[in-house]
Image (spheres, rainbow, N blue to C red):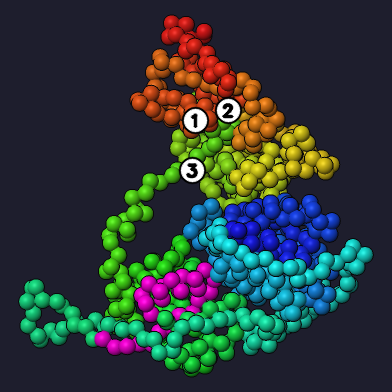
């Protein structure tokens, strides 16, 4: 299983009856797979929520009725739920009714699919949210039940944090039976408790005192779970590393030019490692590589940390130097320093003074950092065991990653967003030539984010979901309208996620801006989950449910008498003309571009059509002048260079259902061709003299 599949199985084994999520890499698949369970068990329910705030609050309400509930999102979702989270921590959950609440949050330390790599564990410093960190795929499953047991024991929500490297890794997983019975509908109820659930003035202060008391007891180890320690220790106490201290020779000593300018003093130092999560697995590999079984302490629960465990580890193993290995912020390191200081144990710590806050760690990266000379208490030192290993690694292996080609993100072949940005670029350039007004583009999150790259370059900021429109409230209101105009971009999924409020704010102020809403009917970037605007005939996954699609245009019409234009994403010339026309209008205006996601359309048509049907594709004629309009300006990835000629890959081309390259070709060098998979018949190539043929 992958980590996400293991999490989903763990939720099922833990007896979870309600899961809500908003899809976001690296955790999107958990919601997709949970839908499978919900479709087969009447007592299991699922909600693909509008955003993380709605999902979290729905899960809280479900748990308060007496069932186990969970919410899933990526690390950036913590920003949305933080307002509700802090007060929910005051009120807690219904632990005595075995109705725990678990948050599964996926991190992105390498910023592979996000706009930042914030360390969500830091939320616990002020929200007091307990955290568990699995280190393997098996533990992704097992930790769900542990989290619910802990949640119900301390009457608080519990978060399971995992980096993308763990969510997307895979391994053999051993299943277990259900550990918790489902609660029947007639047994569910909301238990009224004014003092618990209402956080205002002195009631909130009382709840805050209770919360702090719970966390203090957890730090002291009062809430240990049955048959489950929240820490583990491995390694031999007698293991020492050779620490080499580098010192400059005395100035009075004569030196030749070829002579080393330093002397080396060696001593054995008892080293220990404290870590958590995936870094625990790295620590095993490191010990195997350097052939030293270093004592190491793993913290399964990383907030709050059991103080006595830290003290006993350092004392029992007579640790003289402590390595705290973790990605991102010094979350563990700060807590450990506080604990050691309180117990008057002044042990030197190597943490974020050598390990980076950015990016991901790996065993090789850790060895590389520890093998170099380091400053430790004003002395320049290095560890010989790590240094010896580093010398054995060939430079060719180190340079492999640097030599790999970079894969630039781009639109799928036939994507309507490509047409929109092609038209938008043409229209804004023409408008600048005519009116001397340069366009400012408000960017947002979705498939259309790829429009920030060349050849389109139609994005001037990218902050978070909804901010493309949100920041326009300020920029569009105060820029000089004689020299600049704002074009704000937002997709249908982001529109519902967090764009409606920002759009309403634009409308009430009539802020000068052109808002372009790209509706492809699906959350395409995260796996084609349905959107509230998905038409009924396209909603194949939930066809049995009577879901009324939300009409974005009707909503826009309720905002006032603002100009609204609906465009087809596959009509390039008309889009260019209408964009140009709307830029000349004053005040706020809306352009709604509608076109089904090309990838989803292709899959749907393949299911609906028979295999022996004739297919219409596009070909490039011999008289193509290579003007680059289709290849570089439109940027369609189905068009490829082969033997110094442009050719269309029919396995990628959408053919009759796109025709964008045919429309933009100024030389009529692209033509339709009918391919019969059984006869292998292709329409003749039109001649240069009669291209219309």
- The residue wearing badge 1 is 638
Q: Which mark sits nearer the N-terminus, 1 or 3?
A: 3
Q: Which mark is residue 654?
A: 2
Left or right position of 185 against 344 = right
Q: Is residue 470 visible?
A: no
Q: CA distance from mark 2 to mark 3?
A: 20 Å
Q: Nearer the viewer, residue 545 or 338?
A: 545
- Image spot of residue 680 (x, y percent): 53, 19
At horizontal 39% and vertical 66% (from top left) the residue drawn is 365
The CA distance from mark 1 to mark 3 is 14 Å
Q: Quadrant of residue 200?
A: bottom right
In the rendered structure, the answer to whether residue 620 lies left or right of residue 119 reads left
The residue to which callout 3 is attached is: 409
Q: Furthest-front residue in view?
A: 678
Residue sitting at x 79%, y 76%: 95
Determine the secondary structure under disc 2: loop
Q: Which residue shows up at 62% across the image and 29% down it?
A: 569
Q: Residue at x 63, y 73 (%)?
A: 131
Local crowd at mark 3 within 10 Å, few (<14), some, or many (≥20)?
A: few
Viewer-closest of 483 and 563? 563
- Do the residues under discs 2 and 1 have CB atoms within 8 angstroms? yes
Q: Which mark is residue 518?
A: none
> Which mark is in front, 2 or 3?
2
- Residue at the far right in the pictured view: 186
Which quadrant would the N terminus be assigned to in this image? bottom right
Read off the magenta span.
Answer: 266-292
Q: Is residue 38 left or right of residue 378?
A: right
Q: Earlier in the sequence, mark 2 or mark 3?
A: 3
Q: Quadrant of residue 547?
A: top right
Please say if the residues under marks 1 and 3 sit with CB atoms less than 8 Å apart: no
Marks 2 and 1, the one that precedes in the sequence: 1
């Amino acid at each position: 299983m992958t980590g996400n599949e293991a999490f989903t199985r763990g939720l099922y084994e833990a007896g979870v009856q309600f899961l809500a999520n908003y899809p976001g890499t690296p955790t999107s698949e958990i919601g997709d797979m949970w839908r499978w369970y919900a479709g087969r068990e009447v007592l299991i329910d699922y909600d693909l929520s509008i955003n993380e705030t709605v999902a979290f609050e729905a899960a809280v309400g479900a748990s308060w009725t007496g069932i186990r509930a969970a919410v899933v999102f990526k690390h950036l979702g913590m920003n949305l739920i933080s307002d509700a989270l802090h007060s929910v921590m005051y009120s807690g959950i219904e632990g005595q009714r075995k109705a725990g609440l678990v948050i599964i949050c996926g991190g992105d330390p390498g910023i592979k699919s996000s706009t930042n790599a914030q360390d969500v564990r830091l939320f616990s410093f002020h929200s007091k949210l307990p955290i568990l960190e699995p280190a393997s795929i098996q533990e992704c499953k097992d930790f769900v039940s542990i989290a619910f047991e802990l949640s119900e024991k301390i009457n608080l929500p519990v978060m399971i944090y995992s980096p993308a490297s763990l969510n997307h890794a895979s391994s053999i997983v051993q299943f277990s039976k259900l550990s918790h019975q489902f609660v029947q509908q007639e047994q569910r109820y909301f238990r009224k408790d004014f003092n618990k659930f209402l956080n205002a003035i002195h009631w909130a202060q009382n709840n805050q005192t209770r919360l702090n008391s719970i966390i203090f007891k957890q730090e002291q180890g009062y809430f240990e779970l049955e048959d489950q320690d929240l820490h583990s220790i491995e390694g031999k106490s007698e293991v020492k590393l050779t620490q080499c201290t580098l010192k400059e020779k005395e100035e009075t000593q004569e030196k030749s030019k070829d002579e080393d300018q330093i002397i080396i003093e060696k001593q054995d130092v008892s080293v220990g490692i404290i870590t958590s999560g995936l870094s625990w697995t790295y620590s095993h590999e490191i010990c195997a590589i350097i052939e030293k079984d270093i004592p190491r302490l793993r913290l399964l629960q990383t907030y709050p940390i059991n103080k006595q465990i830290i003290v006993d580890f350092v004392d029992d193993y007579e640790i003289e130097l402590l390595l705290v290995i973790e990605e991102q912020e010094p979350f563990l390191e700060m807590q450990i320093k506080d604990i050691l200081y309180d117990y008057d144990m002044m042990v030197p710590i190597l943490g974020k003074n050598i390990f980076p806050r950015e990016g991901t760690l790996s065993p090789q990266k850790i060895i590389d950092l520890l093998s170099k000379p380091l400053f430790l208490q004003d002395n320049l030192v290095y560890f010989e065991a790590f240094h010896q290993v580093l010398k054995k690694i060939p430079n060719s292996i180190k340079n492999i990653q640097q030599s790999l080609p970079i894969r630039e993100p781009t639109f799928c072949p036939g994507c309507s967003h490509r047409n929109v940005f092609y038209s938008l670029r043409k229209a804004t350039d023409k408008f600048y030539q005519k009116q001397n007004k340069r366009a400012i583009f408000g960017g947002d999150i979705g498939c259309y984010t790829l429009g920030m790259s060349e050849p389109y370059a139609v994005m001037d900021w990218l902050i978070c979901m909804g901010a493309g429109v949100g920041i326009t409230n300020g920029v569009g209101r105060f820029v000089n309208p004689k020299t600049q105009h704002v074009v704000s971009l937002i997709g249908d999924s982001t529109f519902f996620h967090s764009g409606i409020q920002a759009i309403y704010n634009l409308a009430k102020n009539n802020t000068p801006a052109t808002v372009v809403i790209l509706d492809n009917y699906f959350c395409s970037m995260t796996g084609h989950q349905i959107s509230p605007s998905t038409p009924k005939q396209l909603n194949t996954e939930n066809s049995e449910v009577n879901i009324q699609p939300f009409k974005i245009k009707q909503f826009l019409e309720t905002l006032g008498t603002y100009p609204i234009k609906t465009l087809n994403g596959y009509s390039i010339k008309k889009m260019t003309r209408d964009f140009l026309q709307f830029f000349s209008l004053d005040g706020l205006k809306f352009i709604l571009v509608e076109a089904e996601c090309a990838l989803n359309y292709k899959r749907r048509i393949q299911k609906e059509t028979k295999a022996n049907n004739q297919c219409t594709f596009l070909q490039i004629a011999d008289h193509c002048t290579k003007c680059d309009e289709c290849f570089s300006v439109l940027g369609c990835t189905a068009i490829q260079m082969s033997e110094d000629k442009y050719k269309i890959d029919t396995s990628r081309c959408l053919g009759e259902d796109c025709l964008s390259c045919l429309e933009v070709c100024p030389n009529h060098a692209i033509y339709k061709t009918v391919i019969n998979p059984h006869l292998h018949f292709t329409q003749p190539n039109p001649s240069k003299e009669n291209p219309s043929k």
